[in-house]
Amino acid sequence: MKLSDIRTALRELRLSPAKTLGQNFLHDQNLARWIVDQAQITADDYVVEIGPGLGALTCFVLEKGARVLAIEKDTRLANFLRARFTHRRFEVLNIDALKFDPRSLFAHRRVKLVGNLPYNISSALLLKFLEPPSAISLGLFTLQKEMAMRLSASPSTHDYGALTLRVQLHQRVKYLRTIHATVFFPRPEVDSAVVRLLPRDALELPQRDDQLLLKLIRAGFSQRRKQSRKLLREYVSDWDTASRHLNIDPNVRAEELSLLQWIALANFIAPPPSPDARLAQNEQFPVVDKNDRILRHASRSEVHGNNLRHRAVHILIFNQAGEVYLQQRSRWKDRHPLKWDSSAAGHVADGERYDDTAQRELNEELGVRVALQKIAKLPASQYTDQEFIWVYRGSISGDLVPNKSEIEQGAFLPPSVIDGWTSSRPEDFAPGFLECWEAYRRKTQPGSS
Ligand code: SAM
């Protein structure tokens, strides 16, 4: 929209732009088009736009043929947008974007997040939408220039800090260009900049304990001028040994450590588990016939190598909110590494009954023991890797203690989100889980037997 159109629209809406909502409207149409082009949007994309305002970017996103979900807090603007864009591909949600549940986006195959963000909440928005597991495949944002520089900063620069590392841990951030304040009405006090964020590949960075890493980073940057040896004393008692091991200056400050060095420090404090120890043990499993009767016993490699029928359990653990814990399988697994799977799962071992295995796996993988209820038995087939599977469910009220040698990461998700995710991106899941989830939903959804 041209500046004159913006003024007219605001007058008609009786809207005087609110600073608290970061209401600065872009009136340079060439720039708006350029910004949208940087998101490489196609008709296959589902684009979420935060803070669409009067639709400066929205019109160019719609031109690309994509579906658009626009989240606008201001009711007058939301209504204006509904009247301006009547495409079936366009939907407006008149809510605070901080209250939107981004997990629902897993129901779409390819999701891009764009926005000229309200500056006062831009870091909260970014963290909320991009924290893993995130459905977003690309983020393109106009931010306050200072924030854009913090997100894209390199070590040993003024802008490099805890936020830089928190975002760069999962995203590659590119500063695309600076935008002068004059292209907005009303004109903000500071310049802006456009950044593009692309999620890192799962194996791009070494395995690590993210919780510990983020604690270290927070402590390290709590007093910028102090040396890390002092700020991290609680975590590293022998700093000289640590700095020698990591080949860093013993007097280093937080801002001088790269992301990889921070990860190396976390891994020095808590070395990541080595590849699943159980894989090395050449476990023995019962081999069964088509009626699940035991024929003999064989090693894991023989069972899997020759596609022999065997037995397994899958367990779905629910929290008090009715959400299911899904685990992402460790990068070291011999089968389906990094795929999402049931809360816990495993093979029935020699001398075990299904129920024994379920309790053992639950304890080994999630560190809990709870009463389990049998849900369904699946036949061995190509879809279950020739496993007969008993599916169990259980509930917890406390915390899980995920075993890091088996689990890359995990998350509690509402069943409706899992329904959407499994149908939009089945390749994200271990095939056995898809079978188990379908069986579970058949049993538990209204109208099921
Ligand atoms: N995209 C438009 C443009 O470029 O002209 C407007 C950008 S303006 C910087 C920020 C927009 O975010 C405003 O329309 C404002 O009403 C909206 N907004 C502010 N806080 C919001 C929130 N918490 N959730 C959703 N929208 C919000």
Image (cartoon, grey):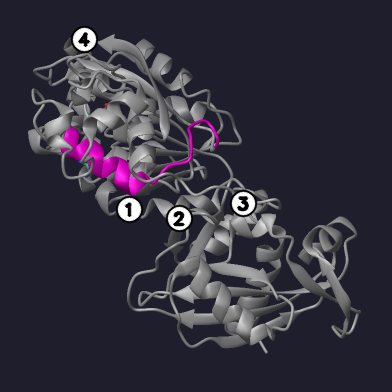
Percent position of residue 64, x then y? 54, 27
Left or right? Give the position of 403 relative to 241: right
Percent position of residue 406, x then y? 55, 57
Looking at the rendered image, the quarter that the C terminus falls into is bottom right
Percent position of residue 146, x then y? 18, 19
Tag 3 or tag 4, which sits nearer the N-term?
4
Q: How far apart are marks 4 and 1 (CA)?
A: 30 Å
Above or below for 399 versus 177: below
For label 3, the residue is: 339
Residue 100: mark in rendering: 1
**Picture quarter containing residue 172?**
top left
Q: How far apart are marks 1 and 3 (CA)?
A: 26 Å
Q: Say what amino acid the circle numbered 3 marks.
A: Lys
Q: Say what amino acid the circle numbered 1 marks.
A: Phe
Within the magenta stretch, is there residue 211? yes
Establish whether ligand 1 lies closer than 8 Å to the Cβ of label 2: no
The residue sitting at 36% across, 45% down in the picture is 210
Looking at the rendered image, the quarter that the N terminus falls into is top left
Query: Are the two marked residues, 2 and 1, in contact with CB atoms closer than 8 angstroms?
Result: yes
Q: Distance between the residues labelled 2 and 1?
A: 9 Å
Q: What stretch is highlighted in magenta?
A: 203-220
Residue 180: mark in rendering: 4
Residue 104: mark in rendering: 2
